[in-house]
C-alpha cells in the first residue's frame, strides 16, 4: 500500500471548502492510506470534516485508513460512537 504525504489546508477556515479540498485529494489519490492535518479547525468543524471525509474515503478505499492530525483529543471522544473504522486521530 502507498502512504500519502500529510495534506494540510492551512489558509482556509471554511469547513465546507476544506471538506471539498479533502474530497478532491481523495478522488485524485492512488494511495489508500492518508494523513490529513485539520488541527487548525475547532472541535465541531474538525468533527464534521473528519466524519464526512472518512465516509467518502471509505467509499473509495474500503481497506484504507486516514490519520487525522487534530487540535484536541476530545474529537476522538466525540466521534467514537460513530465507529469510523478507517480513522485514527492524532492530537497535537
Image (tube, rainbow, N blue to C red):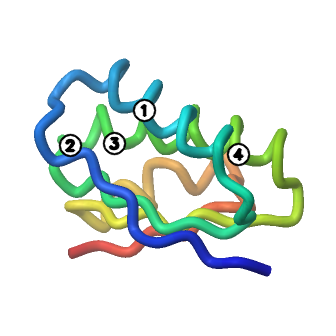
Whole-number angstrom distance, CA of label 1 to CA of label 3: 14 Å
Which residue is found at the position 30% from the left and 33% from the top? 45
Whole-number angstrom distance, CA of label 3 to CA of label 2: 5 Å
- The residue where tag 3 is placed is 46
Upstream in the sequence, badge 1 or badge 2?
Answer: 1
Vertical relation: 36 (above or below) 54: below
- The residue where tag 4 is placed is 57
Residue 21's disc number: 1
Which residue is found at the position 34% from the left and 66% from the top? 69
Whole-number angstrom distance, CA of label 4 to CA of label 2: 20 Å
Upstream in the sequence, badge 4 or badge 1?
Answer: 1
Q: In the image as oriented, which residue stretches furthest toward the left?
A: 11
Cβ atoms at labels 3 and 2 below 8 Å apart: yes
Near-viewer residue (91 or 79): 91
Percent across and percent down for residue 84 are 68, 53
- The residue where tag 2 is placed is 41
Upstream in the sequence, badge 4 or badge 3?
Answer: 3
Label 2 sits on a secondary structure element that is: loop
Amino acid at each position: 500500500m502507498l502512504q500519502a504525504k500529510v495534506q494540510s489546508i492551512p489558509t482556509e477556515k471554511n469547513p465546507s471548502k476544506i471538506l471539498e479540498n479533502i474530497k478532491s485529494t481523495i478522488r485524485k489519490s492512488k494511495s489508500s492510506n492518508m494523513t490529513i492535518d485539520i488541527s487548525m479547525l475547532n472541535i465541531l468543524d474538525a468533527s464534521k470534516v473528519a466524519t464526512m471525509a472518512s465516509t467518502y474515503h471509505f467509499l473509495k478505499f474500503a481497506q484504507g485508513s486516514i490519520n487525522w492530525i487534530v487540535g484536541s483529543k476530545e474529537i476522538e471522544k466525540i466521534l467514537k460512537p460513530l465507529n469510523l473504522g478507517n480513522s485514527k486521530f492524532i492530537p497535537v
